[in-house]
Image (spheres, coloured by chain):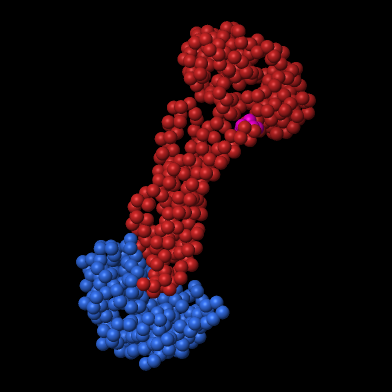
């Protein structure tokens, strides 16, 4: 069974009386263990596509199935539960909770997935260890470097072993030393943990880590 | 889940502290205004509430306990004839001027009662006796009057409306609402001192015979012309309502309590709103991670509840300190258990109400915010 299957996705925004087509007829499919890259210049519709794949934005038309479950037809109460169960997110600007330590940031994701507090704490420390940050478990985000923040974000995304990880420009805020480390972790998540990883990026240095490449331009697939 | 609400609050300790101080201020304001009002009302009806009778009879349309009018003593016999009345007696309250030792003068409220029964007299004597009132022109003065009349002892002589009276007792706990202190004397002495009350009474107080319903007895007594008849509770309430409504006292205290609530709401509302706006991206992230609206509600409302709980606890502590200070100034502040409960509910409602707008902002946050750099 495919982890991700998106078929002929189209997203049209209305601006007053006119319509803007952000994504048109894009299809993506990925198996467990694959890393999919969505590349393209700014404004090409990458983030819009990722938002639709993550169940955050509803497509105007098309179908999306995650682990065989159709998410386009789900109501607003069911969608959060699908995201909670199937998807881990990594964001360009990390989006860590400023008041929480690195471990607590991971614990939040685990708690949402139903881990009891003690088990969440142990699993959070294990996940931080897997991204090389066990020693920074009690640090607040303000005390972490950009690379460390993104590694915490990856640990958080891996919480509860979701089948799908969606990463929005995960290396854009980092130098390439840290960027490479982040891509290796995501690659490892695919190869070792069996996740399907979808990476939105405009950074060509990411290409060697990709199994599938979706090239977007003006909202359409060009390759 | 990790306590995001508490962590977010403690992350900005200065703002958190300011907000808790604001809620505390609001709680103290509500407590003190309610407490002083209740103290005033307790004083307003203190003699009614501490007189062991079931029924009060006054002249027609008398405003309240402190502003009575006289009526003929002959009504006493009619009252005693009414079925269900076990016992009735006369009682007087009249305003008079007292000459002070220092040459000045002070208004007093003279309470005349029957020393043989003690009904209508002081309920706690520090010194002297009620029976001593029968020996001649004599009075019992309350300790609380010393502030106005100067310190007095049993055996001291006073002059009330050109009548020399002897202090034969000192009472405790009889503090009225008006600025004039209550002075107790015998019914007959009161009539002698206050000329317009000769052959007139101000109250007839009565007890209901066992097995009779006070309200039914009151209904029968109301057939007597030119008097108003109340149960003890009704007369107490009438007196309290007079001071509350007719003098604007209730409006004044009510407005201040309302101000306390509004100030508290504004402080908490502003803090939680600012905090919510600052954490909108985090709420968006939580939603992206699969948090439901209920999870978001829980975080924002918990922040409000934390403010309410801490503000209330500190507010009660400060109120207890304030009440001691207020007692020392001669005012009475009453904080009964039901007021503690009511203010707790008001505080929680105030803080939760103040966070409604913030909850809406947090719940309606566009999850796409998480993708913006």
| Chain appearing in red on the rendered image | B
Q: Main secondary structure of the magenta part?
A: helix
Q: Please, is residue B40 above or below residue A20 in the view? A: above
Total marks shown come to 0
Judge from the rendering whether residue A128 lies leftward or rightward of residue B136; answer left or right: left
Location of residue B255 with respect to B123 vertically, above or below: below
Q: Residue A166's image quarter?
A: bottom left
Q: Chain A in the picture: what colour?
A: blue
Quarter containing the N terminus of chain B? bottom left
**Magenta segment range?**
B238-243
Q: Quadrant of residue A152?
A: bottom left
Q: Is residue B240 magenta?
A: yes
Quadrant including the C terminus of chain B: bottom left
Q: Residue at x 51, y 37 (%)?
A: B33
Image x and y of residue A217, in percent: 40, 87
Residue B132 visible in rendering: no
- Kindly indicate the quadrant of the structure image that contains residue B229: top right
Work out whether residue B26 or residue B214 is closer to the camera in this orientation and state it: B26
Q: Is residue A189 magenta?
A: no
Judge whether B318 appears above or below B68 on screen.
below
Q: Residue at x 55, y 31 (%)?
A: B40
């Amino acid at each position: 069974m495919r982890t991700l299957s998106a078929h002929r996705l189209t997203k049209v925004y209305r601006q007053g009386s006119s319509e803007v087509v952000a994504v048109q007829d894009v299809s993506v499919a990925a198996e467990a263990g694959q890393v999919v890259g969505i590349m393209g210049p700014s404004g090409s519709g990458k983030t819009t596509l990722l938002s639709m794949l993550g169940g955050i934005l509803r497509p105007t038309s098309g179908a999306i199935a995650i682990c065989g479950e159709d998410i386009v037809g789900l109501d607003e109460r069911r969608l959060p539960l699908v995201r909670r169960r199937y998807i881990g997110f990594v964001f360009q600007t990390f989006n860590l909770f400023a008041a929480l330590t690195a471990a607590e940031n991971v614990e939040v994701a685990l708690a949402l997935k139903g881990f009891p507090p003690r088990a969440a704490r142990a699993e959070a420390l294990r996940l931080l260890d897997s991204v090389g940050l066990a020693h920074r478990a009690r640090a607040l985000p303000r005390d972490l470097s950009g690379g460390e923040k993104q590694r915490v974000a990856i640990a958080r995304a891996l919480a509860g072993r979701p089948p799908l990880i969606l990463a929005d420009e995960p290396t854009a805020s980092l130098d390439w030393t840290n960027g490479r480390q982040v891509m290796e972790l995501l690659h490892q998540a695919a190869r070792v943990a069996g996740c399907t990883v979808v990476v939105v990026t405009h950074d060509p240095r990411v290409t060697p880590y990709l199994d599938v490449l979706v090239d977007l331009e003006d909202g359409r697939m060009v390759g | 889940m990790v306590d995001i609400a508490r962590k977010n609050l403690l992350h900005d300790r200065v703002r958190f502290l300011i907000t808790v101080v604001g809620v505390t201020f609001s709680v103290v304001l509500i407590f003190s205004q309610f407490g002083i009002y209740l103290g005033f009302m307790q004083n307003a009806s203190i003699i009614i509430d501490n007189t062991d009778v079931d029924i009060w009879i006054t002249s027609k349309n008398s405003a309240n306990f402190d502003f009575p009018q006289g009526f003929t003593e002959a009504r006493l016999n009619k009252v005693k004839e009414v079925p269900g009345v076990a016992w009735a007696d006369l009682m007087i309250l009249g305003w008079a001027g007292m000459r002070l030792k220092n040459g000045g003068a002070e208004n007093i409220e003279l309470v005349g009662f029957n020393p043989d029964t003690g009904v209508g007299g002081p309920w706690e004597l520090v010194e002297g006796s009620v029976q001593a009132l029968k020996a001649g022109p004599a009075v019992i003065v309350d300790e609380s009057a010393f502030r106005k009349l100067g310190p007095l002892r049993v055996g001291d002589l006073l002059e009330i409306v050109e009548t020399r009276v002897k202090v034969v007792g000192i009472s405790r706990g009889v503090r009225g609402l008006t600025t004039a202190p209550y002075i107790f004397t015998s019914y007959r002495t009161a009539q002698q001192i206050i000329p317009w009350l000769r052959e007139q009474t101000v109250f007839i107080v009565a007890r209901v015979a066992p097995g009779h319903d006070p309200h039914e007895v009151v209904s029968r007594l109301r057939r007597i012309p030119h008097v108003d008849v109340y149960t003890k509770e009704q007369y107490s309430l009438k007196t309290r309502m007079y001071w509350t409504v007719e003098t604007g006292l209730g409006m004044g205290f009510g407005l201040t309590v309302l101000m306390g609530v509004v100030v508290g709401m504004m402080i908490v509302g502003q803090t939680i709103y600012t905090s919510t706006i600052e954490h909108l991206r985090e709420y968006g992230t939580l939603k992206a991670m699969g948090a439901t609206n209920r999870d978001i509600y829980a975080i924002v409302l918990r922040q409000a509840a934390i403010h309410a709980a801490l503000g209330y606890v500190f507010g009660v502590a400060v109120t207890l300190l304030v009440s001691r200070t207020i007692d020392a100034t001669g005012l009475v502040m009453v904080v009964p258990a039901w007021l503690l409960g009511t203010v707790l509910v008001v505080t929680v409602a105030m803080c939760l109400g103040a966070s409604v707008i913030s909850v809406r902002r947090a719940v309606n946050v566009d999850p796409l915010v998480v993708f913006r750099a």
